[in-house]
Image (cartoon, helix red, strand yellow):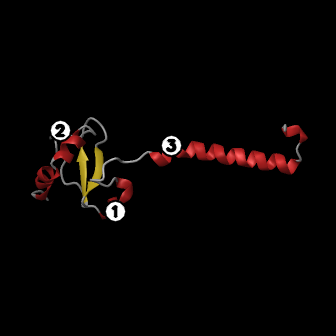
């Protein structure tokens, strides 16, 4: 049946249904995207309670943060800053090694 043979109420129902499905389809990719590592929390989930990062450089590579915004996240209540997201793989291999570098600083 075409839209022209329908009442205004029926056309509005179809339009509302179509817009609802369009909104769901547009939002679905955002629901599927997220952190694939359960080892840490990102700033949007608990940074207020995290201990601040005490260093002026990357805990993994030792590089300064002068080339852009550091990759920051929270690991077990401690804010961690890395020079880039590539250093995350090394951090995740042995977090205790890098956390010990932070424990001796004030």
Do the CB atoms of the residues marked 1 and 2 lie less than 8 Å apart?
no
State which quarter of the image contains the N terminus: top right
Viewer-side label of 3, 1? 3
Residue at image position (19%, 54%) is: 54
Q: Is residue 100 left or right of residue 27?
A: left
Q: Is residue 91 visible?
A: yes
x and y, in percent, of residue 18 in the image = 71, 44
- Name which residue lies at 34% across and 62% down: 48
- Of helix, strand and loop, which one carries label 3? helix
Separation of disc 1 and disc 2 at Cα?
A: 26 Å
Q: Is residue 59 visible?
A: no
Label 1: few (<14), some (14–19) or many (≥20) C-alpha neighbours in 10 Å = few
Q: Which picture quadrant has residue 19?
A: top right
Image position of 76 (left or right of 104): right
Q: Tell which circle, 3 or 1, labels the residue nearer the N-terminal end.
A: 3
In space, the residues marked 3 and 1 are separated at their CA atoms by 28 Å
For label 3, the residue is: 29
Can you say whether 43 is above or below 21 in the image? below
Q: Which residue is mark 1?
A: 48
**Mark 3 packing: few (<14 Cα in 10 Å), some, or many (20+)?**
few
Residue 72 screen position, x and y as percent: 29, 48
Frontmost of labels 2 and 3 is 3
Q: Secondary structure at mark 2?
A: loop
View extreme (bottom): residue: 49
State the image coordinates of residue 57 (x, y, percent, origin top left): 19, 44
Q: Is residue 86 above or below residue 7?
A: above
Q: Which residue is mark 2?
A: 63
Looking at the image, tell me whether mark 2 or mark 3 is earlier in sequence order: 3
Residue sitting nearer the eye, 78 or 7:
7
């Amino acid at each position: 049946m075409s839209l022209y043979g329908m009442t205004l109420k029926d056309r509005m129902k179809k339009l509302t249904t179509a817009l609802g499905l369009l909104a769901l389809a547009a939002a679905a990719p955002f629901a599927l995207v997220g952190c694939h590592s359960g080892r840490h929390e990102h700033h949007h989930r608990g940074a207020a309670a995290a201990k601040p990062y005490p260093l002026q450089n990357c805990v993994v590579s030792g590089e300064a943060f002068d080339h852009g915004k550091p990759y920051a996240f929270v690991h077990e209540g401690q804010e961690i800053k890395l020079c880039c997201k590539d250093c995350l793989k090394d951090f995740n291999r042995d977090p205790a090694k890098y956390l010990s570098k932070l424990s001796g600083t004030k």
